[in-house]
Amino acid sequence: MTNERCNLTRIIGRHVVSMSIALTCFCMQSAAADQSIKNFTLGSHRGVEWSLDDVADQQLVVVAFLGTECPLAKLYGPRLEELQRQYGDKGVAFVGINANTQDSLAEITAYVTKHKISFPMLKDPGNRIADQFKAERTPEVFLLDNERAVRYRGRIDDQYLIGLSRDNIRRKDLAIAIGELLAGTSVSVAHTAPIGCHIGRVSKVKPHGGVTYSNQIARIFNNRCVECHRKGELAPFALGSYKDVIGWEDTILEVIRTKGRNSMPPWYASSEHEPGVFSNDARLTEDEKVLIETWVDNGMPEGDKSQLPTPPQFVEGWKIGEPDQIIEMRDPPVPFNVAAEGIIKYQHFEVDPGWDEDKYVIATEARPDNSAVVHHIIAYIIPPGEEDEEKKKSRKMLVGFAPGATPRVMNDGTALFVPAGSRLLFEMHYTPNGTAQTDLSYIGVKFTAKGNVKRLFTGGAAAARELEIKSNQITKGVVAQHTVNQAQMLLDMTPHMHLRGKSFQYELKQPKGKDWEMLLDVPNYDFNWQLTYKLKTPRLLKEGAVIRCTATFDNTDDNDANPDSNVTVGWGPQSWDEMMIGFFSTRDPYESELKTAETESLNSDLAGD
């Protein structure tokens, strides 16, 4: 039983608390209160020495361990500054400590400047003070009383989690602890679980062994990570060089060992799906995981630099080539203001692309204007005459973007038909990063003439619009079906739910088939990653075939992402509402594919006879 669960028990106000939970909470609170901090001296990012004794006249001291690149440290830096302004003249001193071996003084200075931090920010070379505090993560705070004993340690509040933001702060842990001590009472919750990145500690293991960064690890990171973990992309830190990686090893080990939410690389299809089923399968192999773990255990040797692989080359500019038309997400093209913190509801912008004649689309690419805050983009097609606002949001996708996504390019005479008069609906998902930003994302489209089109790229969706996700319950077996009205080749699947989404499955039953075949099983759906699962080999959907989608929703307090477990929710456009849509893409089959299917069907019938 973790102390996090103990805290949630208090916050939610459950009436029955077992003796074991109460004892766990008492023990963890006592452990926090028993720790005393001796005087220490560190240099600030500007080279000025600071000692704990310098604030001997202050009744309380807040010591915050921070990092420059951890997403939660970016979000909570400004919040600590707010608390410093609130309590600074009430006998409470604030000080930040950066113990990350990977963070330079220049990077710390940039962090302080960007987030307008006024309290001292110290550098802890060799993690000496982090070890004294037994600090683990960034951000993690310690509240010291007038005798410099730790009276509270853990998170600042509970609004931000890994990859998640709650609408509102449910418990202001640090502020409550400060208020209680200033009032002369004991701290009601003395220890919470800190959430964030591991502190980048200096390795105590002398580098050794045959697994080196240059020979093996760089290749893994180049193939699996660097596309997103590089400068200018959404991922929080770079992994393109040995210097980039050192200090992040504990965080890397944590996320590659995680199953389900927060795993890296992001991939949520069941492990029962064999490698090779999906062309964009991002999973690390077990051998790759073992190599990374061995390398870290052996002290992370760099190895012979001459063995370094050629760095991956990423296309600058349009991956589809110069588009025939560029369409910005707003008309007129006014950038959207992205707040520094908090939750930003989905933004929807309707745009008229001026398509006064039928269009045949052969390539599409969505591009974020500001990749630091754009989590995903979806551009939906609104056919002429469609005025229902809710139906607009379950229409066919023209193009989407999410971290690591690739553009859609159609070859061999395949094209997407868009009728004249269609408009576009941009759906924008933003993730604040601690500083105010602006964004004006856009898409690029390439067309072809009707005479060049041999096959149509199509698609569809199975949607359960009559949703009722009851409060404080897990709702299982939400089903939606789609019947195929002519033979098609299935190319990919994109499950879509919101924050209460728990699992999603696609199944297929062919005409005359007796059993349902599993196409895609996502047992741990993650709203933060709108992944498309692309089949390596397209599947024939015969005329009359049925695609069945089945979803589970978790509207309980066990779901950390849940905005509010006490409300029943239905269909709606925002993340605190719900949706259940099984998008999929198809194209017309080649003649050879139909003949192959006929032969296989005939052989199957003969075998059955």
Image (spheres, rainbow, N blue to C red):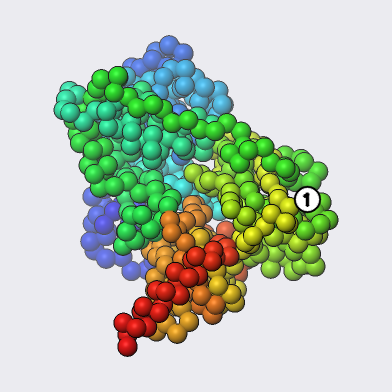
Above/below status of 437 relative to 555: above
Instruction: Between residue 520 and residue 529, name the one nearer to us.
Output: 520
Name which residue lies at 51% across and 50% down: 165
Image coords of residue 598 (percent x, y): 45, 75
On the question of residue 234 being in view, the answer is yes
On the question of residue 193 being in view, the answer is no
Amino acid type shown at disc 1: Pro
- Circle 1 residue: 353
Q: What element carries label 1?
A: loop
In the image, taking residue 536 as reference, residue 494 lies left or right, namely right
Name which residue lies at 32% across and 59% down: 274
Above/below status of 381 relative to 374: below
Asked which quadrant contains residue 434, the reply is top right
Quadrant, the N terminus: bottom left
Asked which quadrant contains residue 374, the reply is top right
Image coords of residue 562 (percent x, y): 48, 60
Residue that lies at the very extreme toward the bottom in this rendered image:
609
Instruction: Between residue 533 and residue 526, name the one nearer to us.
Output: 533
Name which residue lies at 76% across and 67% down: 386
Image coords of residue 166 (percent x, y): 52, 53
Residue that lies at the very extreme toward the right in this rendered image:
356
Image coords of residue 593 (percent x, y): 49, 66
In the image, taking residue 49 as reference, residue 169 lies left or right, namely right
